[in-house]
Amino acid sequence: MTIRFGEWTIGLNGEGAPGRELIGGKAWSVARMQALGLNVPSAVVITTRACAAFTAGQATPPGLDDEIAAGVAWLEERTDRRFGAGPRPLLVSVRSGAPVSMPGMMDTVLNLGINDETEAALAEECGDPLFARNTHRRFLDLYAHIVLKADSPLPDSGGDPAQWRDAIRAATGVEVPHQAQAQLRGAVRAVFESWNSRRARRYRQHHDIPDDLGTAVTIQAMVFGNLDARSGTGVLFSRNPLTGEPAPYGEYLPRAQGEDVVSGKFTPEPLSALANELPEAHACLLAAAETLERAGRDVQDIEFTIERGQLFFLQSRSAKLAPHAAARIAVDLVREGLIDEDAALRRITPDQVRILLAPHISPPAIHEAHALASGEGASPGVGIGVLVSDSDEAERRAHAGEAVILARPTTSPDDLHGMIASRAVVTELGGSTSHAAVVGRALGLPCVVGCGKGAFEGLAGRTVTVDGRTGKVYDGALAIESPYESDHESLATLGAWAASRSPLRVLPPSAPESRDAVDLTGDTIAADPTTIGEALKLIKGARGARGGAIASDEGVRAALAAGLEFIVADPVLPPLLAALRSQSATAAPSVLTERS
């Protein structure tokens, strides 16, 4: 039975949880993992309706504070801990969760509820004052940055809580609350406000996500990956998100918290390190990954924490996949009986196939090339452009028509606009689950991470070629080659499925019937995807068309609207997928897709 504390707040216990439209993807994931019997820290959720009410009135909805207090009391009962007091203090994380996945976009506060009293109690309970002090510093740093909008982080070492609080007050003009309930109210408000931050609006605009969905807020009991040598945190993909290989893939960072992994500030270890250090936890993790993949019928991106050898699951969601991996996995899941052919075709976008079939560096060029930097290939593809080190500059120069490569020590959501404008992204720090890597894959943007501190010093303004598959950054603009659809067995299979269902035939240039198509090459109106429909209205009686922007998604929609039987394109699969998407969009438009 769903546990409700009023109009806005719900307790998650794995029984009868509402849909993700109300409780958001994060809380929905928590409830699903609970229902599957996995070990998940207790949590309550403030619904998206509360966010909508806050946004409408720019004030806390009536009764919400009392409901939050009731939810915290429920967490205290389930954990046998006390929020804001000893002897067994309850600390919580505060995370946003929109109904659709928005990786890296929203703000998270960890270790909330700590103050001088609870730090002392935590030190007494764990027998480790250094751990308790580190946890206090982490909270103050996150709260200052996320809630109070401080620009500079606290130092990693040195000082004490009083000095840190003074530094935050000097930087922001605001005091970090000592009282745990006041901390919680500030964090919840910050999550609501972040829904309309510049970076959130940019992400929604780029991915056509409606502004009125709102975000939920999940308040979850903390578990501590930074507690001791048998603790840590990591991210596991149930299959390789780069290649599609049906084998677990991920990273583990001992004695750390989740933000250490996704921030890109630390370079984690491979999962084999976890297998060596904590084999029982590793075995449980792999078994759970298989369970979650079968339940979700998709590759899972799983966040986990280990506290003193005990495995906890924080989130599981459909993974963002590189184009090659997406194609291979879609076909494999059909063959394994987890999804049908129609579902597989819905999971592959035209742009993913275009990226997969985009040019790559030719082998002779690589043989002669000089590598300026080397890191981990985090998102396949090739990008060529001028190296810039500032996101605002990248956006400005790209809008002026220049091809740019964004180079940063590590990226954060504040760099999103620069990433979108760039041909590739390279970072000095971080691993394959860092912000740059995850967002790069979602955007289909070539990305290389972990090149080393100072790797790009003195390179600004130089033209480089970035290979997101091999992790190399080469000097100059290298020669490139283009692959063919026939080179990829998965694409050939998807092409056959799509061709049998598409409302529009798509012919390769070599097909004899292609000679009957009207050639739009040289037509300036037909060359623009926004006006190609006007050009098609002028070719009365034509059965097919070629050239111009006919192979674009807009061109496909225009061809269907004009009643054409076929178009001519190379490659064939992207317009086939665009035709299927156009057909399904007119039948049942929805933002909440099966892979949200």
Image: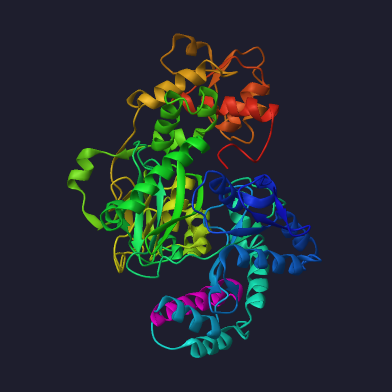
User: 457 or 318, which lies in front?
Assistant: 318
Residue 446 visible here: no
Residue 134 falls inside the magenta stretch: yes
Residue at the far left: name it: 367
Residue 266 visible here: yes
- Residue 561 relative to residue 427: left or right: right
User: 154 or 380, which lies in front?
Assistant: 154
The x and y percentages for residue 184 are: 64, 72
Task: Identify the magenta region.
Answer: 128-155
Question: Above or below — where is 574 with respect to 398?
Answer: above
The x and y percentages for residue 336 are: 42, 26
Residue drawn at (61%, 68%) of the image: 76
Question: Above or below — where is 489 with respect to 299?
Answer: above
Residue drawn at (64%, 48%) of the image: 99
- Residue 322 relative to residue 554: left or right: left
The x and y percentages for residue 21 are: 68, 46
Residue drawn at (54%, 86%) of the image: 165
The quadrant of the picture occupied by the C terminus is: top right
Residue 337 falls inside the magenta stretch: no
Residue drawn at (62%, 82%) of the image: 177
User: 167 or 407, which lies in front?
Assistant: 167
